[in-house]
Amino acid sequence: MSLSAVRRLRLCSLSLGASACIRTATCRPGPGRNAFSTSTPRCVMDMSVFTDAQLTVREAVNQVCSRFPNAYWREHDQNEQDPKEFHAALAKAGWLGIALPEELGGSGLGISEATMMMQTIAESGAGMAGAQAIHANVYATQPLAKFGTTEQLTTTIPNIISGKWRTCFGVTEPNAGLDTLRMSTFAKKQEDGSYRISGQKIWITCAQVASKMILLARTTPLEDVQKPSNGLSMFCIDIDRSAAGLELRKIKKMGGRAVDANEVFFDNYAVPANALVGQEGSGFKIILHGMNAERCLLAGEALGLGYAALNRATQYAQERVVFQRPIGQNQAIAHPLADAYMRLEGAKLATYHAADLYDKSKFDDTITQDAVGVACNSAKYMAAEAAFTACERAVLTHGGMGYAVDYDVERYFRECLVPRIAPVSREMILNYISEKVLHLPRSY
Amino acid sequence: MRPSAVRLLNILVPVKRAVDYAVKIRVNPQQTGVDLNVKHSMNPFDEIAVEEAVRLRERLKDAVKSIKVVTIGPPKASETLRTALAMGADSAIHVEIPESAPAPEPLGVAQALRAIIQREKEGAGVDLVIMGKQAIDDDAGQTGQMLAGLLGWGQATFASKVEVDAAAKTAVVMREIDGGSEEIRCRLPLVVTTDLRLNEPRYASLPNIMKAKKKPVEKLTAAELGVDFTPRLETLKVTEPPTRVGGGKVESVDELVAKLKEAGFSAV
């Protein structure tokens, strides 16, 4: 087979996988492996800032993602179907252990590389749904890996890396959202040392499919502690959906419908003593460990979604002809996309700077946790806003077609609201920067 | 333990860094070649060759003693070696040529590979070379045959199935030929060139990518191998093929047949 035949093969595989005139960079028919390695030929992102390690991650993750084209995500979104094959494929290739220590079967890379992994996933067309099916396994395991006992680590982490167990992250409550310290879910210690959990969590992603939950709960009532941040404890509990005292209720939502989000009700739910991670009462400090990492990952996911939308919009603007010329020739189409590109590029620099700072702060004492917090929160804010701009303009560039499910950009648009809202709202980040960086009086 | 009667197999897999198959190639403005400032990756046929070597080890276990990959190329070709190491090769040789140097021609490559194989004789030697039947950049499709000729070894080209008996030092290879396939039995040492249907290469897993970073890569130069990569051919000009112009439309089959007859075609 000649060179041209090889290229033709690739071209026809592209057109088979997508409906008429929709071709994306990574869209390929699943589930079989194409004979050759993959690439994203049409990506407008500048790659010059990335390290070799990040580029390697991007290339290799892209290979796995290329088996899950936009059609896969469109269908799973419409049917509200868990992307379990996608989770299994990434687990099989070892990606869930990217930022976990090598002695536990992970690969010991940093958040800089994990952020690139999440960006690549979102950018492949998987969007926030694909990212959310994966990311708790990456960041919620960080505090566990750091503070868990040898027994907890050796029984849990390898099963999460291999994909046998999935994990979810249980912090948010209906009456204590951003005000985490007011949470009321209570773990009451029994005489035999075990705990009984009562209370309610909300927006718990993947609880329907997870075997484990990293849970934050009060072990000392708020009234009895000197500081509200005391008296919270972190647990790594089994999610036994058949056991008494545990009920899950799915929440219908705007985007990312392939992954479930839930209300979780505990009513005297029994967990053994060895589910406690770290010291009782120091759970808040422990869980904070994962939060800056989570902000970086979310920023990466937002960037991925933004670039995916921009790539699609650019392609459409080149191909769609109205009045005998491509619509991209009109500045009213081109300029908003050029503007969206610059916003994404700026946010990209902020994101990978924050991730780099996070990783370096582990070895460099001159980097304060406040500095890391400012960088990570700023990056999340900027990336989410840039993604929103790119996704909205991608829909508008497509005109009426942007409203059609088959063109994917409406799905990106619905999903790009997630990083604006979670894991912390835009307004709370603005509050944080006003107070911590500008030293203005606290408003709340 | 009694020493094993199985004779051990050492496999060499030459790989080439080429313009990625998914890139839409363009002729450069000077018309001296194509624009190379694009994404590169391992030549797809070489990926199949690496995969086959790794699968041979999975089938024959310890009978495959070593899998070594070799590339001839600019500094960036080391990425291609890392990919091969992540897929399962044990060690690598990089014959480095300057970034600006012209691409070596098949004969030069075959001579360099021969020199490497002769060099390996001081150690365990090479029993089997598995390589792509051609690279998708120049589509020469000559190197494997030239290498077998230079070494005086057997060759099994366009392989779609490879079975090796390490103890007997023989191989049975299914070849893709015009109109079907041909099965041949060969003695080792042997050069096998891979066709598209031989296998589907695997993805490198993250742990294997990490392990690949620690695997040894030896650097060599053309001078150290005593070969000369100076091209024997001169490229005069490279141009894009003429753009295709659309044909006419006909209303009916009869009209089509009439037009074909008019153009001189007739039913046989």
Image (cartoon, coloured by chain):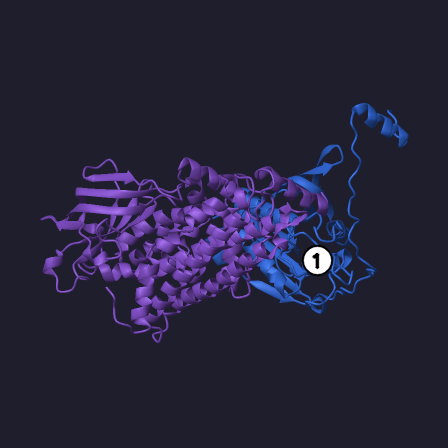
Chain colours: A purple, B blue
Q: Amino acid at mark 1?
A: Leu
Residue A369 shows in the view: no
Where is residue B241 drawn, in percent x and y? 79, 50
Relative to A270, residue B18 above or below: below
Q: Nearer the viewer, residue A273 or B153?
A: A273
Q: Nearer the viewer, residue A315 or A112?
A: A315
Picture quadrant of residue B198: top right
Relative to B121, residue A398 above or below: above
Neighbourhood count class around disc 1 (C-alpha, 10 Å): few under 14, some 14–19, many 20 upward: many
Where is residue B68 drawn, in percent x and y? 60, 55
Q: Is residue B110 left or right of residue B255?
A: left
Residue at the spot 77% in from the left edge and 54% down from the top edge: B150
Residue at the spot 21% in from the left edge and 42% down from the top edge: A265
Q: Is residue A366 left or right of residue A303?
A: left
Residue A149 shows in the view: yes
| SS for callout 1 | helix
Extreme residue in the bottom direction: A366
Q: Is residue B232 left or right of residue A329?
A: right
Chain under numbered label 1: B
| Location of mark 1 (residue) | B113
